Amino acid sequence: GGSRAADRLIKAHPEPHRLKLFLQLEAKNMGIYLPDLFEDGMDGGNSGDWNNIMGETIAGTLSYNGQRCTALKLLFVPKSHSEEFATILAKKVETLSVGLPWELHDSNDRSKAKYSQITPLPNLSRVSYMKELIADAIEKGASIINQ
C-alpha cells in the first residue's frame, strides 16, 4: 500500500512511537551517488565505469518513460559534481533515439537496428502533467540543459 495505508496502520498501533519507520517516497526512488565515486574524475562520462554508471542511470530513469514504479526519480549527486554530472547525463540522453515504440533506428540492416529508446507519453493528460512539472521546476530555479 501507499502512505495512506501506512498512516492508518501507524495510527491504529497502540504505541506508534515505538514503530520503526522508513522514508516513504511514494515510488520516488532515489539514485545516490556517493562522493568517493568522483575521486578519479568523471572523464567526461567516457571511461568504462562512467559509461556503465550513466547507462544504468538512464535505464533507471527513462525506461518506460519513467512510468514504472521502480523508476529512479530523484538523483542525489554531491553538489561539487552536480553540474558536470547533469551535463554528461544530458549529452548521453541526447544520443537516444526518439520515436514510437515499434520504430527501428540507426541501421539499414534490420537485424542490427534498435527500437526507439524514448517514446511518447501514453496520453494527453500525462503530457499536460509533464508540462506542469517542468513549469514548476523552472519556477523553483531549475533550468533545461538538453536540446
Image (tube, rainbow, N blue to C red):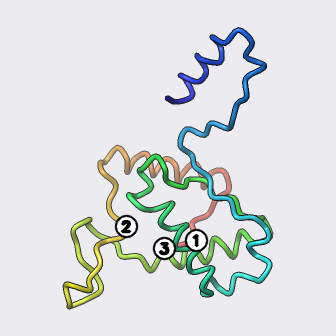
| Position above or below: 13 against 52 | above
Using residue 16 as the reference point, say whether residue 147 is left or right of it: left
Q: Which residue corresponds to mark 2?
A: 118
Residue 118 or residue 11, whichever sits in front: 11
Q: Position of residue 18 (x, y in %)?
A: 77, 20
Give the numbered dot on residue 10.
none
C-beta proximity under 8 Å, tags 1 and 2: no
Q: N-terminal of the two: label 1 or label 2?
A: 2
Residue ID for mark 1: 145
- In screen coordinates, is 137 left or right of 14? left
Q: Is residue 73 above or below residue 110?
A: above
Gap between marks 3 and 1, in whole Å?
Answer: 11 Å
- State the residue in front, 112 or 127: 112
Residue matched to label 3: 93
- How many residues crowd around disc 1 within 10 Å: few (fewer than 14), some, or many (20 or more)? few
Labels 3 and 1: the sequence-earlier one: 3
- Name the residue rendered at 73%, 16% in the picture: 16
Characterize the local packing of mark 3: few (<14), some (14-19) or many (20 or more) Cα atoms within 10 angstroms.
Answer: some
Q: Distance from label 1 to label 2 (Cα)?
A: 17 Å
Q: Residue at x 55, y 66 (%)?
A: 57
